[in-house]
Amino acid sequence: MHETKLLRPEVTTIDGIPVASVELTLLGLAGLMPHVAEMALDRALRLDLTTSRRLGAFVSAAGASGRNGIGVLRQLLDDHDPLAGMSESAMETKLKQELRRQGLPTPVFQYVIRHRGRFVARVDAAFPELRIAIEYDSYEHHTGKLALVRDSDRRNRLLQIRWQQVTFTAADLARHGGPAIETLRALHSGAARAS
């Protein structure tokens, strides 16, 4: 049996069932599975289930009691950059985690690329100042004739306006970034030196 003073204000009842708040759920995940907690945090913020401010207040209040996972949740909040946009899937969050493990900066997620005021593409992530687009291609959304044509058209439009694209897959992330991370690292360091 486990008791905590945090539960009283952090549990509500829905249809007669006690339910933990989003903040308390994130804290529990942070204590047990930090990588999953980051995915859940990204999703909760994207779906407006909580806010950075509300989560920050919760962490401040819960931090005094030394709860398991509070350090992880505090770090996730500290690392969260609202100007970097939101990842839209668990795999994009895994991509963000891999880039961080590899010592690369966090890109801007869901970046809209325009050229001369006209829409060119919306990419999963980008380093806009270096003109590098990053895509995560899932087997679900990037297979078949229509996806092949769409993805090829986007890559060609990006090349026309001198953007480079690096594409990651689940296989790349399973191999700590695979060849895609090396390509991204080379592009990033080369573009950074040139600018």
Image (spheres, helix red, strand yellow):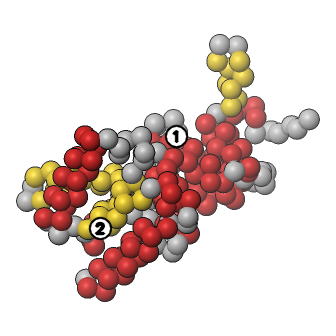
Image quadrant in which the N terminus is located: top right
Vertical side of 87 occupied by 140: above or below: above
Decide: marks 1, 2 in contact (CB < 8 A)? no
Residue for badge 1: 44
| Label 2 neighbour load within 10 Å: few <14, some 14-19, many 20+ | many
Q: Amino acid at mark 2?
A: Ile
Residue drawn 22% across the image and 47% down it: 149
Q: Residue furthest top?
A: 15
Q: Residue furthest left?
A: 116
Taking the image as drawn, is residue 82 in sight? no
Q: Is residue 81 left or right of residue 165?
A: right
Q: Is residue 24 left or right of residue 53?
A: right
Determine which quarter of the picture holds residue 106: bottom left
Q: Secondary structure at mark 1?
A: helix
Residue for badge 2: 132
- x%, y% of residue 28? 71, 44
Residue drawn 67% across the image and 39% down it: 25
* Mark pair 1, 2: CA separation: 28 Å
